[in-house]
Amino acid sequence: MQSKATHRTVVVMWGLACCCFVVFTFVPTGSIMQIPPLVNPGHTMKSSDPSPLSPTTSAKRLDGRLKQLLTYLKLYNQEIGNAGKRLGQQKAEGIAPNRVNLRSVAENHFVKLAQFPSVSTVFLNQSFDEMKPYLIRDYYDYTSNNCNFVEGKSRYGREMAMELYNASCLEDLKSHLYSRPLQKRCLNIGLPLKFPHVSGHETWTYLNVIQNAAVTSTGNIESRNLSLTPMRCKEAQPGEFPENPNEMKEYDAVFSVHQTSATDFYHSSLEGTPRLAPYVQFLNDNPYVKIHFQSSNPLQNVLGIRDIEKRRLTKQDFRAKVLYSPSGAPCGIPPLFATQLVSFYARKRLSNSYRNKVILIKRSTKRFFKQHTDIESMLRGEASSRALELFVFRDDPVPNLEVTMKMFNEALLIVAPHGAGESNILYSQPGTALIEGLCFDNAGKGNLIYRNTAQILGMRYHAVLYKTGCGNLSVDQLKEPVLFFLNHLDHLFRGST
């Protein structure tokens, strides 16, 4: 994307340990910065090449994969720091009473955003073919007892599954025996409509660095004459904002991932925490930067951000001389890169090699299986006959993080009514099967957010939806998919990555 800037500085820096050169282009405030891809000299990845990290379930190999992704992120994080320093040294203007609203989801968003001098945007650009070997390898179509009913009566139905994941709903459970590779279209999640990727320099994520900014109660960002709406749930709601924002307490630098429903478990796990994941190094290198995140979800702790509790801001009563705002995502549609990164951070602490669990999620209030006792008995019998263990995951009380991570990481099969407990599939190994009893919301729709999450995490997903709703699902209605997955363990879970 071309800048209107009249000058720029080109800096040559040392790149990887292999001593290749990496060239950064620094572009002045109010324009767009693109980070060029890192290249491993002497080798061009071909589709026929074996993965640099062979398919494995060991924590050691997962750690190596994460380290390579962090190498790609190193220079990106450094440039974010440089952009913040430049903005912090420039004279700032106050927040104006009348502001222009820009929606991050809108077409040509970055062209419009470049007109506002208080904002600099940094992109992570990297070849899709170079990155792909370090991400989850295998992905699957999803299944249901009635695809027409599920997709016709649910949010995020047929068109979205194909558009975002190249995935179809099928009623033949045997489709879970076949996988497909990562689809480039998944990169579009979290980017504006019709975003123009450059082949070989695809955009994986981005971050806005904003001068003299404040955040509304729903996550909008106010700076000078700009009101910026990140991708988030309920983005039509601008949120509350004080009449005199320029009189609020001021911090030197704040990293904000605040948004609507920030403290709810699903939203904090799959919308808030992933926005932190690509920036762990930046936050650790700059300990003076406050972190604006209302949630105390313990998942944050797996990222390894130093002193996160001491640095956390939970209210909107502040301004920041420099505000760092990472890309978000549409409601219920987790982005590819950041979500897998969170999962990798979490799973590197786990064995990732031993799976012998069937998990049944038990909800204590709304959207619970009314025949839970019978369903539990069936699952226990089927698991026991195969030398597997049934673990009932209750929400009252919720197991601690250590137990939760271990159980979901060791799961082969998860059976659940629709609910936030399914967010713990972040800890599961790719290929794990999730059977979900879909429920109707107040608008009479099922919600396929966990199909979306399963797609991004390379998991198998089967939806069970009946006109009577998820609470009335019977043992017989769940038994067919349960038996399919348990009878195909050797095939389903061989070589998942």
Image: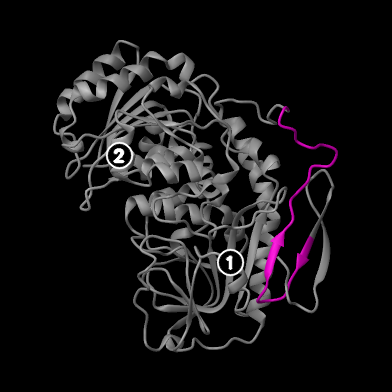
Q: Which numbered disc flags the more N-terminal residue, 2 or 1?
A: 1
Question: Is 29 a magenta residue?
Answer: yes
**Residue 132 appears at what percent x and percent y?**
64, 39
In the rendered view, does 294 fall on the left or right side of 111? left
Relative to residue 329, is residue 137 depicted above or below?
Answer: above
Along the line of sight, which residue is nearer the eye, 426 or 491?
491
Comparing 306 with 26, the one in front is 26
Residue drawn at x 36%, y 24% as measured from the top left:
357
Identified at 39% across, 39% down, the residue is 451
User: Is the residue marked by circle 2 packed among few (<14), some (14-19), or many (20+) residues within 10 Å?
Assistant: few
Q: What element carries label 2?
A: loop
| Residue at screen point 37% across, 83% down | 242
For the residue marked with disc 2, what is the amino acid? Pro
The three-letter code of the residue at mark 1 reads: Asn
Res 168 quadrant in image: top left
Q: Which mark is residue 108?
A: 1
**Camera-side residue: 423 or 230?**
230
Q: Is the magenta region chiefly helix, strand or loop?
A: loop
Is residue 376 at least partly visible in the picture?
Answer: no
* Residue 209 as seen in the image, left or right of residue 242: right
Q: In which quarter of the image is residue 405?
A: top left
* Residue at the spot 55% in from the left edge and 51% down from the top edge: 188
Q: Where is residue 494 in the image (x, y as percent from the top left)?
A: 52, 19
Give the label on residue 399, or none: 2
The region drawn magenta spans 24-48
Q: Where residue 180 sits in the image (x, y, percent)?
A: 55, 30
Q: In this view, does 349 lie to the left or right of 153?
A: right
- The quarter of the rendered structure image containing the N terminus is bottom right
Which residue sits furthest top? 385
Which disc is residue 62 wearing? none
Q: Is residue 192 above or below residue 394?
A: below
Q: How far apart are marks 2 and 1 (CA)?
A: 45 Å
